[in-house]
Structures are given as structure tokens and as C-alpha cells.
Image (cartoon, helix red, strand yellow):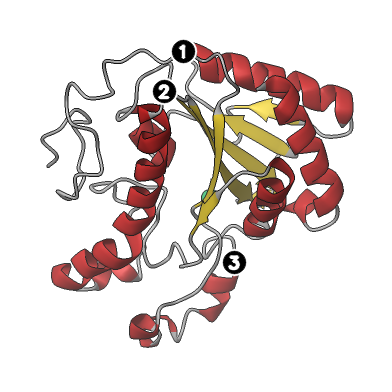
């Protein structure tokens, strides 16, 4: 268990912030925030050491349970358009879910959960914590330089889940108790309505922004006025058809909103 300010598990990697460092400094957001894009479910790659584990699960790997189809190409396009860094993983979330916290029952899938604890710990060491630590270090460096950070984690969702048709093309997930995130998503949604009126954009849909995940973890590490963590959820039905048009609309609206 981490002994630093975040009060969450950090695996002793010291990527969280010591008490009294930048937690207590105020950040003046006079400049546009530094934008960071991430993609936690970018691929369905299985590391060689675990190939035999997935031999009978090829269909599952190719499904929305294996990865977020279309999310990584979208994140790459957004990063290019917005000249922002992109930190991503292409390892399947069926091995370990980078958008779940240690201790969450969804961290490992039904397939990887059966592995011995020592192997699961190795998976965390080699395929989980490095992703989080890269992100934490990037954000911490900007905040130390008194720059606020807007983090957009790019995900996609399946158009139909358990027989329910999802009623949006885009979802913006945030914590409604945080003013910056709330205002930003309102403005982003409004700007998208003007630039791309055919897109249905919903806030905190199809999931809630306060659910366990990377952004919720990062909110515990950084000051309110220095970090905003938004999950951009994109309906896979629209991603496959109009990637360039879609990402142009998203990027242009985000520029207006931020
Ligand atoms: Zn995802």
C-alpha cells in the first residue's frame, strides 16, 4: 500500500507524489493546459509468455472484451491533430485491465485470474505499472513546471451490449464534483453539437466518470486545479466509418472547449 499522498496502491514504485510537494502548490491556469492522450485498451496483443493461455480464446480476443476496437487509431489521429503526446498499450485487457485498480475484481479476466499469484504479480510489474508510471511521471513533470494537465483517455464501446442499443456516438466521462472537468465537458459537448450536429454526445454515458479506473486513480494524486481526467468513449459503429471526419470534429471542439 502506498504511503504517500495518494492513499492508493502504487506498488511502492514511488510514481505517486510525496506529501507536501506539488500537492499543496496552487496552479495558475493562465496558459492552455498541457494535453495528454492515453489509450489503455489499444490492442489485443498477447505477450509470447502467455500465448498458450489464450489458444482457445481467439474469438474472445477479437471481440470488444479483448480490446477497444478503433480506439487506438482514433487516439493516434487526435494526437497528431492536436500535437499532443499519446501513451498507449496494445496488450489485451484479457491479460490485465489497465483501466482497473489493483484490488478490483476486474483487474484480471476469467482467463488470467487462474494464473498463480507470482505470475499475476509479474504481469502487473511488466504490463500494468509501467503504463501508469509513464502517465504519472508525465503529468507530475508538467505540474511541477506549474502547468495544468488535461488528460483525455480514449476508449470505444460496442454499439449493442446485452441486447441494449447504445444511444450515443460519443460519451464524455468525468467527475461531476470537479468544476474544471464538468465545465470542460459541457463546453466540449456544446462545441460538438455545433460542429457535428449529427453526433449524439452524452455526458457520463455509457459509464460513469467516477467509476474505478485510471482517471479516478490520477485524481487522487494531483491537485484539483492542476489535473482534469476525461474519458472519451466512442461508439465503435461510428469509428469504423468516418475516422477522419470524426476525429477532426472531436479535436476542433476540444480546442474550443479547453
Ligand atoms: Zn476501454
User: In this rendering, which labeled residue sits more in front, label 2 or label 3?
Assistant: 2
**Quadrant showing the N terminus:** top left
For marks 1 and 2, the one nearer the N-term is: 1
Q: Can residue 67 be seen in this view?
A: yes
The residue at the point 52 percent across, 26 percent down is 174
For marks 1 and 3, the one nearer the N-term is: 1
Q: Tell me how far mark 2 sits from mark 3, CA to CA.
A: 42 Å
Q: In this view, does 102 lie to the left or right of 141?
A: left
Q: Give the structural element (helix, strand or loop) at label 2.
A: loop
The residue at the point 23 percent across, 73 percent down is 115
The residue at the point 53 percent across, 20 percent down is 181
The residue at the point 25 percent across, 49 percent down is 102
Q: Tell me how far mark 1 sits from mark 2, CA to CA.
A: 7 Å
Residue beneath label 2, please? 146
Q: Is residue 108 visible?
A: no
Q: In this view, does 158 lie to the left or right of 27?
A: right
Residue beneath label 3, please? 63
Q: In this view, does 241 lie above or below 23?
A: below
In the rendered image, residue 76, in percent from the top left (x then y), is placed at 66, 55
In the rendered image, residue 205, in percent from the top left (x then y), is placed at 61, 32
Amino acid at each position: 500500500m502506498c504511503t504517500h499522498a495518494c492513499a492508493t496502491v502504487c506498488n511502492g514504485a514511488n510514481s505517486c507524489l510525496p506529501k507536501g510537494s506539488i500537492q499543496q502548490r496552487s496552479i495558475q491556469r493562465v496558459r492552455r493546459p498541457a494535453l495528454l492522450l492515453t489509450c489503455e485498451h489499444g490492442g489485443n496483443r498477447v505477450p509470447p509468455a502467455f500465448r498458450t493461455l489464450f489458444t482457445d480464446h481467439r474469438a474472445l480476443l477479437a471481440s470488444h472484451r479483448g480490446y477497444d476496437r478503433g480506439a487506438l487509431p482514433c487516439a493516434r489521429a487526435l494526437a497528431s491533430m492536436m500535437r499532443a503526446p499519446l501513451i498507449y498499450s496494445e496488450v489485451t485487457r484479457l491479460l490485465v485491465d489497465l483501466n482497473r485498480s489493483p484490488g478490483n475484481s476486474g483487474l484480471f479476466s476469467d482467463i488470467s485470474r487462474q494464473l498463480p499469484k507470482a505470475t499475476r504479480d509479474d504481469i502487473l510489474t511488466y504490463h500494468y505499472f509501467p503504463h501508469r508510471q509513464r502517465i504519472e511521471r508525465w503529468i507530475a513533470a508538467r505540474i511541477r513546471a506549474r502547468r495544468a494537465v488535461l488528460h483525455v483517455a480514449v476508449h470505444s464501446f460496442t454499439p449493442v451490449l446485452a441486447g441494449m442499443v447504445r444511444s450515443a456516438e460519443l460519451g464524455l466521462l468525468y467527475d461531476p464534483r470537479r468544476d474544471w472537468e464538468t465545465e470542460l465537458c459541457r463546453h466540449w459537448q456544446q462545441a460538438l453539437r455545433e460542429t457535428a450536429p449529427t453526433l449524439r454526445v452524452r455526458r457520463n454515458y455509457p459509464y460513469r466518470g467516477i467509476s474505478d479506473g485510471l482517471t479516478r486513480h490520477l485524481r487522487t494524486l494531483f491537485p484539483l486545479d492542476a489535473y482534469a481526467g476525461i474519458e472519451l468513449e466512442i461508439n465503435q459503429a461510428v469509428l469504423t466509418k468516418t475516422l477522419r471526419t470524426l476525429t477532426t470534429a472531436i479535436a476542433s471542439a476540444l480546442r474550443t472547449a479547453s
